[in-house]
Amino acid sequence: MTQFSLEEIITSDNLVHQGIFHLPKNPGKKAIVWVHGLTSKFYSDPKLMELFANMSDEQGIGFASFHTRGHDYVTSTHRLDSANEKGYVHETIGSGVENFTDCIKDIDAMVSFFVHRGYSSVTLVGHSTGANKVCYYAGTVPDDRVSGVVLAGPMSDRYSAGFDEAINREHQRIMEQKIREGKGDELLTGFDFFPLTPKRWMSLLGKGSPEDVFNYRDEIGALSTFGAIKSPLLVIFAGNDEHADQPITTIRKSFDAHAASSVYKSVIINDADHGFTGKEAEFVSEIVSWVTTSSL
């Protein structure tokens, strides 16, 4: 049985996030942190977490997975508050209400977790919306502590499979009207698979938002944030990603054409769905091998 310790990180705005950490038997200086996707959580895939821990352990790599402020649909966490007799207040968070750009604070706290433990080479691995967050962080925040970036399942939310432009335009009209009326934080249902606010909808599905980093179909400004990443970079695609609106090979070519990192690799895991179900060992092995052998 793989051993994990339960850990907490505190963000610069005093949010408390729970997570797990695996300390390898013979620890080195490299570490991997998993950034989960939309409505997910740090423990959403125990099999994947155990594979990461076991394969990382063999290479002396530390591994951790933490909640972000976007975990679950709508939930709560503690915000430290010295003025409160308990030392904290309850903060409403979750994918339906989060401010995407605050992911910078979550990821910074994850990296700091490892640095405080003596690790000097931290690789960020983001899956799905976690990939959006890692891409945004790596493309906008200078951070010498981050030595590698892995984007797994980097699909566009705007151009997801089944995208209907007419419906999207109508939904955007409704959201913009709500925001003009001062109802941008009103929780709505029926506009996605989870309840979300108009502001959150605009971030997730609005063209040109900070979250819209995987805009590979746009004629102007495609993948500009991705192209700003200079850290060593690995992009992993699922061959049968159900969210892809065009062949994965076509999407991969777009990423390859815009990559600016001098250490860059893209891989397709054949026959894998968006969650890499049944292909977890191949998926994790690809990442750990890259972290081990690349000059990170």
Image (spheres, helix red, strand yellow):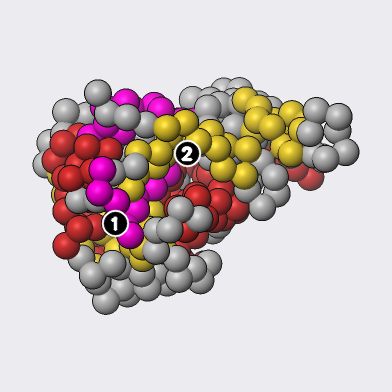
Which of labels 2 and 1 is toward the front?
Answer: 1
In this view, the residue in front, 77 or 132, is 77
Please identify the quarter of the rendering in which residue 277 is found. Answer: top left
Q: Which residue lies under the disc numbered 1?
A: 28
Q: Are marks 2 and 1 in contact (CB under 8 Å)?
A: no
In the depicted structure, whether residue 23 falls above or below residue 48: below
Q: What is the span of residues highlighted in magenta in the rendered image? A: 25-52
166 left or right of 163? Answer: right
At x 83%, y 40%, the residue is: 82
- Residue 18 position within the rendered picture, expressed as x and y whole percent measured from the top left: 53, 33
Could you tell me the amino acid type at mark 1? Gly
> Is residue 138 rendered magenta in the image?
no
In the depicted structure, whether residue 33 falls above or below residue 272: below
At x 65%, y 27%, the residue is: 76
In this view, the residue in front, 186 or 158, is 186
Query: Quadrant of the image for the N terminus?
Result: top left
- Residue 230 position within the rendered picture, expressed as x and y whole percent measured from the top left: 37, 73
136 left or right of 291? Answer: right
Quick one: SS at disc 1?
A: loop
254 left or right of 145? Answer: left
Q: Which residue lies under the disc numbered 2?
A: 66
In this view, the residue in front, 109 or 165, is 109
125 left or right of 173? Answer: left
Please identify the quarter of the rendering in which residue 123 is found. Answer: bottom left
Residue 268 in view (yes/no) = yes
